[in-house]
Image (tube, grey):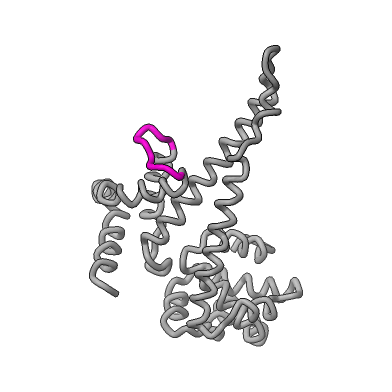
Amino acid sequence: MDPDTHQIITQVYQAKKDNAAADELIAAYMPFIKAETAKFLNRPPEQSDDELSIAMFAFYEAIRTYSRLRGAFLKFAAVKIKNRLIDNYRKEKRNRITVSLDEESDDRPDLIDTIKDEHDSFGENEIREATQQEIAELSAQMTDFGVSMQDIVDNSPKQRRTLECCRKAVCYARNNPDILEDFLRTKRVPIAKLAEGADVERKTLERHRRYLVAVLLICTNGYEILRGHIMQVLKGGGDV
């Protein structure tokens, strides 16, 4: 780990338990926060922009939820900021549509007729681009583990019972950071520990080892969009 990376991780962990340190870290990284906001707005943000306040809050949220297991902090924070801005955009869009249903005027068309413009697809495009970026990053990282995207497709659980077995194993791993750390360090799925800890059949996990590589990576490195999707897929009998 290079000195700069080590320094920011140290600062983040200090900021987790010290509000003053958190405020200092946010102030120090305001250029980064503004740059991420500018990517979303396609222009430099103004102090009065709600998006800038949302981005600052997202950065603070990133501080509070960051773990070394999630990879580089700034990458993690950038994803948090983008997701919060997208969520806000979609919420405002829904609100505009709700207002448009109630507002009418004799001298102009209903707002519902004019609400659609070039920005309507902005949120979807952002989500699509962010998802594609996460997939590309995950694919590159999986290469280090000797697994490809096609392997994941071929190795995905097909039966509900098998999916539930994998869900329990992933849930156990997420609740035991030492197992995830061991997975990242050795680049091997700790099948025996997962089977024993989750009380599932080892042979079932063995058959889906390559699938578990992808899911565990998604759980440990801040792939926000992919993690939300994979958790929905694995959901069954309880939340992962």
Q: Kindly indicate the quadrant of the structure image that contains residue 197.
A: bottom right
The foreground one among 44 and 103 is: 44
Is residue 182 in view? yes
| Residue 63 x %, y % | 36, 54
Of 27 and 44, nearer the camera is 44
**Up-down: is 44 above or below 36?**
above
In the rendered image, residue 31, in percent from the top left (x then y), is placed at: 30, 49
Q: Residue at position x 58%, y 46% from top?
A: 123
Pick out the residue farthest to the right. 159
Residue at the (47%, 83%) spot, across then down: 187
Q: Is residue 93 above or below residue 35?
A: above
Of the pair 26 and 100, the residue shown nearer to us: 100
- Could you tell whether 56 is left or right of 89 in the image? left
Quarter placement of the N terminus: bottom left
Q: Which residues are magenta?
A: 42-50
Q: Secondary structure of the magenta portion, mostly?
A: loop
Residue 96 horizontal/vertical position (percent) = 61, 30
